[in-house]
Image (spheres, helix red, strand yellow):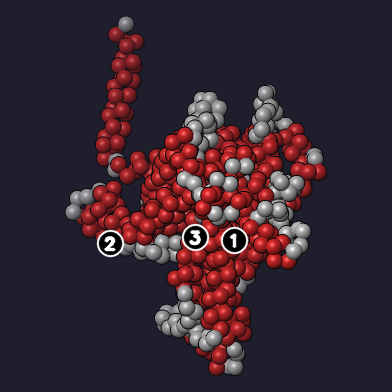
């Protein structure tokens, strides 16, 4: 009996020693090491899991879960589905080209010339960026609707023609509306690149006899071609992933795009497998675009700065500077001013089609939203809770991961950076379907919850926060953190006491960008909201379905006013150049 118990006693003693050694290691493990593990798990949850689940769902038979290609056959067996995909690609290309045409001259005028009214040009860009795409689309419906739009009414009154000249319910109309809202992406990239170009090469071209336009097209713009291409790709991705504007314009015009077709797969009975299979080409097209960009840029070097610190001088245009200002005013008029004027008029009208008369003015639309509408008050609260939550979560997550990657604290840290940027190449609507496939069903069953909305918005806009934090992190030398650690502080204390205070303006700028984009997000929200988690964007879409443009305009006005308050606060904290600065 005694002999047989000896091995058991020895084994138990060995186990206790092993656990004691493990506990000893854990005592000496820095809290930051545990944090890195948690961050990896969060990224897997936010990015990897939804995409893997999306792919698996595209291959699963409904009900049985068996592997099949039936979902792909269903998704691509009908001509209208193929047409919708081709329409989306044409929409993305047309919108991106038009955005470049709109934005590049504006960026050049603001960055390189003595054009007056540069502050106005910046306000136009900021206004177009803040206004949600679907709200701008409503403004254009009121402006250029075939029969009742203001511009068509003015045309028939002036010319005596029976029909208006504009038709917003058309493919060109959809391209123009989206481009007028998306061009700030191209402007921001191009303006930032132009600000880095020294005047030395332009001076050399002028000495050799080149004029201003020749120098601009043959010297200046080629140097910022990578930035223009990056803006082009972002606008392309935004256009093919938009749901609200195509739903308002394309459906009445009787043509489909991918996002509206995906929405039809979510009308009862929900076909998650077919939707997942149909979403795959968007992901493949996006990856192909990024690959083409790298291939094109790898063939040629683009250097606009040297170690000599070249001088930047404004180009004097003479009388032409007023022509450029007129161009910027023209873009601002159609991108921001006219749509906002007609929306404001509609929000204070009993019936917007009756025009601006005293007997048509009312505050009933705002009173109805604030006190009587079933969902308006809750949607306002939901929108800003989700936007604030997503902005805080994304900013914190991005800062921590940028720190890990920049300081090379873990092996394969670059993989974390890649996962942070991965949602950039995932259209929002595809990401939303991935979240639905991964987390709507048990065991988590998060569909229709605030948690799922915040997580989806965080994943959607994490690349913006990470790019902001990574660029800022490169400006902080590790020596300052090492001083804290020499004095006995841990790594987390060094981050809290040194890194975060130094980067607070950049962090605030990234936070503000995520917040603005989250308040206007519809493409992801429309697939994930529940009865009690509707956002302003979803309620606006519901109101547009009812044709209640007066109440819709009032709710859009409330959204813009509250967003502007946050933006003004952000100006104080992050600076007026928060959209441009990345360090």
Q: Secondary structure at mark 3?
A: helix
Q: CA distance from mark 2 to mark 1?
A: 46 Å
The percent coordinates of residue 180 (x first, y second) are 59, 61
Estimate how packed mark 2 is, as few (under 14), some (14 to 19) or many (20 or more) residues with alpha carbons within 10 Å. few
Residue 180: assigned label: 1
Q: Earlier in the sequence, mark 1 or mark 3?
A: 3
Residue 321 visible in the current orientation: yes
N-term mark: 2 or 1: 1
* Residue 212 vertical placement versus 402 (above, below): below
Q: Residue at x 41, y 61 (%)?
A: 578
User: Horizontally, is 272 left or right of 255 in the view?
Assistant: left
Q: Nearer the viewer, residue 191 or 75?
A: 191
Identify the residue shown where x is 26% and y is 37%.
27
Q: Which mark is residue 127?
A: 3
Quadrant in the picture for the N terminus: top left
462 or 492, which lies in front? Answer: 462
Q: How many marks?
A: 3
Front residue of this view, candidates 293 and 132: 132
Task: Residue 300 in the image: state x and y as whole percent.
Answer: 60, 73
Single out the mark in the foreground, 3 or 2: 3
Residue identified by numbered label 2: 479
* Helix, strand or loop at mark 2: helix
Asked whether disc 1 touches disc 3, contact meaning CB atoms under 8 Å apart, the reply is: no
* Of callouts 3 and 2, the N-terminal one: 3
**Residue shown at the point (57%, 79%) measured from the top left:** 323
Query: Which quadrant of the view contains residue 160?
Result: bottom right
Q: CA distance from mark 3 to mark 2?
A: 41 Å
Q: Secondary structure at mark 1?
A: helix
571 lies above or below 366: below
């Amino acid at each position: 009996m005694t002999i047989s118990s000896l091995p058991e006693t020895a084994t138990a003693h060995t186990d206790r020693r092993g656990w004691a050694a493990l506990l000893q290691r854990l005592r000496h493990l820095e809290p930051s090491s545990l944090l890195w593990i948690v961050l990896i798990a969060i990224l897997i949850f936010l990015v990897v899991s939804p995409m893997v689940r999306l792919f698996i769902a595209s291959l699963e038979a409904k009900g049985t879960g068996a592997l099949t290609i039936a979902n792909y056959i269903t998704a691509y067996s009908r001509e209208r589905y193929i047409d919708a995909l081709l329409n989306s690609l044409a929409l993305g290309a047309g919108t991106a080209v038009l955005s470049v045409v709109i934005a590049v001259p504006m960026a050049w005028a603001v960055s390189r010339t003595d054009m007056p009214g540069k502050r106005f040009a910046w306000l136009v860009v900021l206004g177009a960026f803040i206004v949600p795409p679907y709200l701008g689309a409503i403004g254009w419906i009121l402006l250029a609707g075939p029969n009742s739009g203001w511009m068509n009414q003015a045309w028939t009154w002036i010319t005596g023609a029976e029909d208006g000249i504009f038709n917003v319910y058309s493919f060109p109309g959809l391209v123009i509306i989206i481009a007028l809202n998306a061009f700030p992406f191209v402007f921001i990239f191009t303006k930032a690149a132009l600000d880095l170009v020294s005047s030395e090469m332009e001076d050399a071209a002028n000495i050799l006899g080149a004029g201003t336009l020749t120098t601009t097209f043959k010297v200046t713009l080629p140097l910022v071609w990578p930035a223009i291409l990056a803006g082009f790709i972002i606008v392309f991705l935004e256009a093919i992933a938009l749901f609200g504007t195509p739903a308002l314009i394309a459906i009445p015009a009787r043509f489909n795009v991918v996002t509206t077709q995906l929405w039809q797969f979510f009308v009862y009975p929900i076909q998650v497998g077919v939707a997942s299979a149909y979403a795959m080409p968007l992901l493949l097209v996006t990856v192909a675009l990024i690959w083409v960009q790298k291939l094109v840029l790898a063939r040629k070097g683009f250097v606009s700065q040297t170690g000599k610190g070249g001088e930047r001088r404004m180009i004097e245009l003479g009388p032409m500077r007023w022509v450029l200002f007129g161009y910027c005013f023209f873009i601002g008029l159609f991108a921001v001013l006219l749509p906002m004027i007609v929306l404001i008029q509609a929000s204070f009208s009993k019936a917007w089609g009756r025009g601006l008369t005293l007997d048509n003015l009312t505050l009933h639309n705002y009173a109805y939203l604030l006190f009587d509408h079933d969902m308006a008050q809750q949607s306002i609260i939901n929108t800003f809770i989700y936007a604030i939550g997503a902005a805080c979560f994304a900013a914190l997550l991005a800062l921590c991961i940028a720190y890990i990657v920049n300081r090379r604290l873990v092996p394969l840290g670059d993989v974390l950076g890649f996962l942070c940027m991965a949602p950039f190449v995932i259209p929002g609507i595809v990401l939303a379907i991935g979240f639905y496939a991964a987390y709507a069903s048990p065991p988590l069953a998060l569909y229709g919850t605030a948690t799922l909305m915040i997580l989806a918005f965080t994943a959607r806009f994490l690349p913006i926060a990470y790019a902001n934090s990574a660029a800022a992190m490169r400006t902080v030398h590790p020596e300052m953190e090492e001083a804290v650690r020499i004095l006995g502080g841990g790594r987390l204390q060094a981050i809290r006491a040194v890194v975060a205070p130094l980067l607070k303006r950049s962090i605030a700028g990234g936070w503000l960008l995520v917040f603005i984009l989250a308040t206007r997000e519809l493409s992801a929200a429309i697939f994930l909201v529940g009865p009690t988690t509707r956002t302003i964007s979803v309620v606006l879409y519901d109101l547009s379905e009812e044709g209640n443009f007066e109440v819709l305009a009032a709710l859009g006005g409330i959204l813009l006013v509250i967003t502007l308050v946050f933006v003004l606060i952000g100006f104080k904290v992050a600076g007026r150049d928060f959209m441009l600065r990345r360090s």
